[in-house]
Image (cartoon, rainbow, N blue to C red):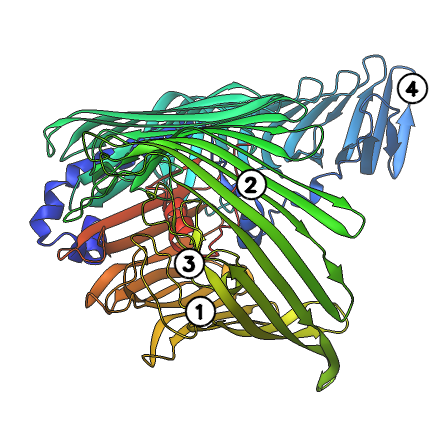
Amino acid sequence: MLRAIYAIVGPFFGQPAAFVTHRRVIITALCLGLAPAAYAHGASPGRGAGPEASELCETDELAALLRPDTGASDQGPVRYEADAAQSTPERASLSGNVEVNRGDQRLLAPRLELDRKTNIGYATEGAEGGTPQFAFRAKKAEIALDQNVGHYDDAEYFMGRSNAQGSAKKVVDDRDKAVTDLDQATYSTCKRGDELWQIRADTLKLDYNTGRGVAHDATVAIGGVPVLYSPYLSFPITDERQSGFLAPRLSSSSGNGFDLALPYYWNIAPNQDATLTPRVITDRGFQLGTEYRYLGTRGSGEFYGEYLPNDREAERDRGMVDLRARGAWFPGLSSSLIYDWVSDDDYFRDLGNQLDVVDTAYLQRTFDTTYAVPFGGVLLTRFQGYQTLDAPDLKRVPPYSRLPQMVYFGGWDHGLLRYDLRTEVVAFDHPTMVTGTRFDIEPAVSLPLEWSYAFVRPRVAYRQTQYQLDYPGNTGATNDTSPNRGAPILSLDSGLIFERPLGFGDSAFTQTLEPRLYYLRVPYRRQGDIPVFDTTLVNTSFNALFYDNRFVGTDRLGDANQLTTAVSTRIIGAADGRERMRLSLGQIQYFEDRRVALGADQLVDTGSSDLIAEGQVTLGRDWYLRIAAQWDPHNEEARRNAVDLRYRGERGAVFNIAYRYSNRGDPPAQGAPADTDQIDFTGVLPVNPRWRLFGRWNYSMLDEHVVDTFAGVEYSDCCWAVRMLGRQYRDYPQDEEAKNAFFLEFELKGLSSIGAGVDQFLNKSILGYTHPGSTSRY
């Protein structure tokens, strides 16, 4: 078995000796995985209960005996049917196709003896029957109709909700207590007679109230071979949250060696839970992770923390904290908290990202309160800071902290006019650079006129910004400590909408042609002596052609005397109104040279902007194409190109191809993103209902090497699944050396799984990836 695994994964580790060295770790992990898998069920319910299993499983021979869940009372009248019957005041004998019905339970037997005083029926020549949850076939049956209790000898059973089946020497099914007790029993979600895995127990209790099965003196057999004995095993029979050990996570990488995590899930209350995750990393040491979550009437939150004492590779203690909280205190007032912390710059690269963090360069610490003002508008109060994580060969400058920031924005309609107001006051703090307070206000009035065929939106605003600055040391001796800037903003947005019918074969569509003109006038104001606290250039896009400022943030107000000319065309389905295609093209014509920049003022004498084109096409329900391009007509070269082609097919088929190119120019524009030239393929290919392939290939043509690539395979049967994935990746595109990793996940459906959370990894790596059996705890 190990040689077969090595044949697949060996290239990711190098020499066979490196793999054999950790053979004992693999075997130990697999054995540990079986034990907790049988002991608990928490965040991830067994997929044997879900729709995926029903597609892969043959219908059990007892499934037809399950009864529809009609909610009928089990205390109602008993109805008997038979070919023949004899009756006395003490006993009744029914023979020939006997059928007993009461509510949603039924018993079938060739012969039934009924004690009329105790209302107990005896079927000694065989019986079968079922309820909405449980079906059986037995050699003998005793039914206590008044107590809703059935006793069955030498029985086979089937549980429809969990797709589980088995046999027992004796079965006692108590409908009132919602408990089934079995002696000398077996349990599995595999096909009857072809069980890859099976629990064999001296006694087995299926409790529908708790959603768990409890086995005593139990043995777990795989392929008919006993692999684990335990005096006590507990496992899920429903998909509800329950305390216990979760599936272990097993992986291996060139930086960490073998990595085993064994989470324990604690279902504290219906609105609270916690997970403790001990983790053994062979090259680094022992780590403990803790997650706590709550959900209340006035808020919710999650806390996650990790601690690794004395990392053997890094030679220091390491840890991280991730805190998220949201509150709704009374109508109109809400709050949110984000606090992220890691012990060192290399934490994510070495130990992975367990946080809800998208940007691992600047970790947030933000507390917001939002208040809906009674007379209209919203008031936001924010306290925000960051932890900056440096990258190799890159010294990042920490961003400014906002301590605090208060923003009010509101809008009111009065007749044909619309009035808008935005105000802000914020105090900026920084350990080494200029600090200060900024006050900004922008009132505006507009006249939005719209018709089915056209629109005209004139707008007039005035933006005033005032600073009070503190320069470190003597650097502010020659600087203005209270600069200000004020300027009017005039704009006129207008457009026409032309329509015509369009036909392709038997399909009818409507095509539009939408020319648009947008004039913007902002006079020049000198701003080179104003520090840049939180302002950068707008990311280039078609929509950005219609912004009233080419900067994001308040520290710069771009001077403008310009006209945007653009045109769009759309194709819309006449029957359903769905947009099938949109193409847009636009450019800005500058009537005056621009002078305001992020740094000192400078002249930019281009007569026009780059040409911006964007388009998207929806082909049926499965294909989607999006393109974007930016062309510099002055230097006759592309500044940006992006292509996204996506396919979403049946049974989870996914195909994505993306191309990204960006050129900052020479010299690069201040605040522009880094150069990029990458192509990215990702996909999931269901070969048939049981086999799936998945992978990724992300190549940087700028750096001339692969940034991230992986390939994997999944086999999924009725009762078990195995997933294997090998990966080679770089933390940063410019890294010379790549890292290797291997993931293995082995799942016993309806019991639990052993693995590295391959589903979680694929969800992050492949756009559109889903697993039919995936669920969440809430």
The amino acid marked with disc number 1 is Glu
Q: CA distance from mark 2 to mark 3?
A: 47 Å
Direction top: furthest residue: 117
For disc 2, the marked residue is: 49
Q: Nearer the viewer, residue 170 or 629?
A: 629
Q: Give the percent coordinates (x, y) of residue 585.
A: 53, 75
Q: Is residue 704 visible?
A: yes
Q: Are marks 3 and 4 in contact (CB under 8 Å)?
A: no
Q: 106 above or below 657? A: above
Mark 2 or mark 1, which is nearer the start of the sequence? 2
For disc 4, the marked residue is: 88
Q: 751 above or below 332? A: below
Q: CA distance from mark 1 to mark 4?
A: 110 Å
Q: Is residue 26 left or right of residue 468?
A: left
Q: Nearer the viewer, mark 3 or mark 4?
A: 3
Callout 2 environment at 10 Å: few (<14), some (14 to 19), or many (20+)? many
Circle 2 — which element? helix
For disc 1, the marked residue is: 592
Which numbered disc covers residue 539?
3
Q: Give the percent coordinates (x, y) of residue 485.
A: 44, 45
Q: CA distance from mark 4 to mark 2?
A: 47 Å
The amino acid marked with disc number 2 is Ala
The amino acid marked with disc number 4 is Thr
Q: CA distance from mark 3 to mark 1?
A: 22 Å
